[in-house]
Amino acid sequence: DALPVPEALPVAGGLSASDTLMQLQADALQRPVRRHAVREASAYGAALAAGMGAGLFGESDLKRLARYDAEFLPKVGRDEADAAFARWRDAVAV
């Protein structure tokens, strides 16, 4: 069975600070990209897991605790995104 595809891709980490890269991701994936307000979301996620383990909150609280500071929506259609990917693939081919 295939895993469900999320409506939007949550992103975090150093490269997520680049609005340009996040827009390229949204265009290539043809779905929204949401940037976590907490850039190091892995550490934040570990803290949330610890809080759940300690009984401070449950799984139903996770959506409330997730914070995003930006959402990037696709600005180009699938054909244009595919053509850009093909150009990139040709440019990096060895």
Image (spheres, helix red, strand yellow):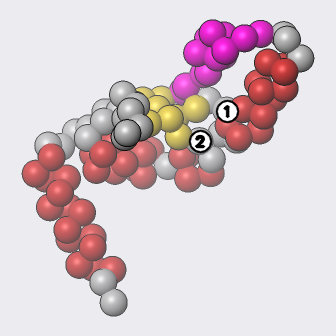
Q: What residue did someone put label 1 on? A: 38
Whether pointer 1 and pointer 2 mark residues with C-beta atoms closer than 8 Å, the reply is: yes
Q: Element under label 2?
A: loop
Is residue 36 placed above or below 53 in the rendered structure? Answer: below
Q: Quadrant of residue 69?
A: top right
Q: What residue did someone put label 2 on? A: 12
The location of residue 4, given as percent across then percent down, is 38, 33
Q: What stretch is highlighted in magenta?
A: 57-69
Point out the image quarter for the C terminus.
Answer: bottom left
Q: Furthest-front residue in view?
A: 1
The location of residue 35, given as percent across then percent down, is 52, 35
Residue plotted at (27% across, 79% down): 91
Point out the image quarter for the N terminus.
Answer: top left
The location of residue 19, given as percent across then percent down, is 44, 44
Left or right: 49 in relation to 36? right
Q: Which of marks 1 and 2 is nearer the N terminus?
A: 2
Q: Furthest-right residue in view?
A: 54
Q: Element under label 1?
A: loop
Q: In which quarter of the image is residue 33?
A: top left
Return the residue nearer the eye: 21 or 12.
Answer: 12
> Dot 1: within a 10 Å radius of its alpha carbon, few (fewer than 14), some, or many (20 or more) residues?
some
Return the residue nearer the eye: 57 or 41.
Answer: 57
Residue 72 visible at all: no
Residue 84 visible at all: yes
Is residue 72 placed above or below 79 in the rendered structure? Answer: above
Type of residue at label 2?
Ala
How many angstroms separate mark 1 from mark 2 (CA)? 7 Å
Left or right: 65 in relation to 36? right
The location of residue 8, given as percent across then percent down, is 40, 31
